[in-house]
Image (cartoon, grey):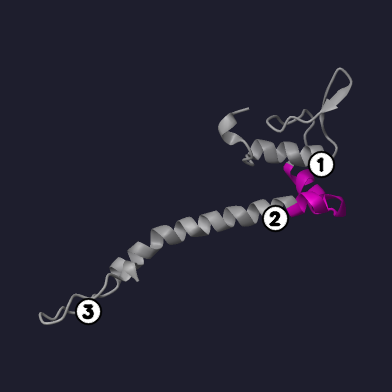
Amino acid sequence: GDPSLKGVVTPTRLSALINSAAGIVARQQGAAFVDLDAIPEGALSPSAAARFLLSPGAASIRALLADEAFGAADLLLRQALRKAVPLIAAALPQPPRLPFLPPPPDVLDL
């Protein structure tokens, strides 16, 4: 696999993980193995994967996926805030400047 994707959950890896948790694994010369960068033949359909994920037997994989989802949501929220805060601060009305007072502090420096 691509070394830059180490630890990253891609759609292919997610599908392979769900299929292996459901017991669908690749077989080669009678031996079973899990390749997280390839989807095995006879993989679950999206509806079957959803049924499996909602079943009691998938509690551990749901916990893993919940952690990944929380991490992704946190990352996306932080990125959106980092982009939005300067735009919001720039849109705020600025107080008038009085010649005998020092200028007010920049909103982003507070």
Residue type (three-letter) at the residue carrying disc 1: Ala
User: How far separated are the C-alphas under marks 3 and 2?
Assistant: 46 Å
Q: Residue at x 11, y 82 (%)?
A: 100
The magenta region covers 46-63
Q: Which residue is mark 2?
A: 66
Q: Secondary structure at mark 1?
A: helix
Disc 3 packing (10 Å; few <14; some 14–19; many ≥20): few
Q: Is residue 90 magenta?
A: no
Q: Secondary structure at mark 3?
A: loop
Residue 107 place in picture, x, y as percent: 31, 71
Q: Is residue 56 magenta?
A: yes
In the displayed structure image, the side of residue 73 where residue 15 appears, left or right: right
Q: Which residue is mark 1?
A: 21
Which image quadrant is residue 7 in? top right
Q: Residue at x 77, y 28 (%)?
A: 41
Q: Which residue is mark 3?
A: 95
User: How far separated are the C-alphas under marks 1 and 3?
Assistant: 60 Å
Residue type (three-letter) at the residue carrying disc 2: Ala
Cβ atoms under marks 3 and 2 closer than 8 Å? no
Which image quadrant is residue 109 in? bottom left
Which image quadrant is residue 63 in? bottom right
Q: Is residue 20 shown above or below 33? A: below
Question: Which is nearer the eye, 84 or 42?
Answer: 84
Predominant SS along the magenta part: helix
Q: Residue at x 71, y 39 (%)?
A: 15
Whether residue 69 is visible here, answered yes or no, is: yes
Residue 22 place in picture, x, y as percent: 83, 41
Question: Which is nearer the eye, 54 or 100?
Answer: 100
Q: Secondary structure at mark 2?
A: helix
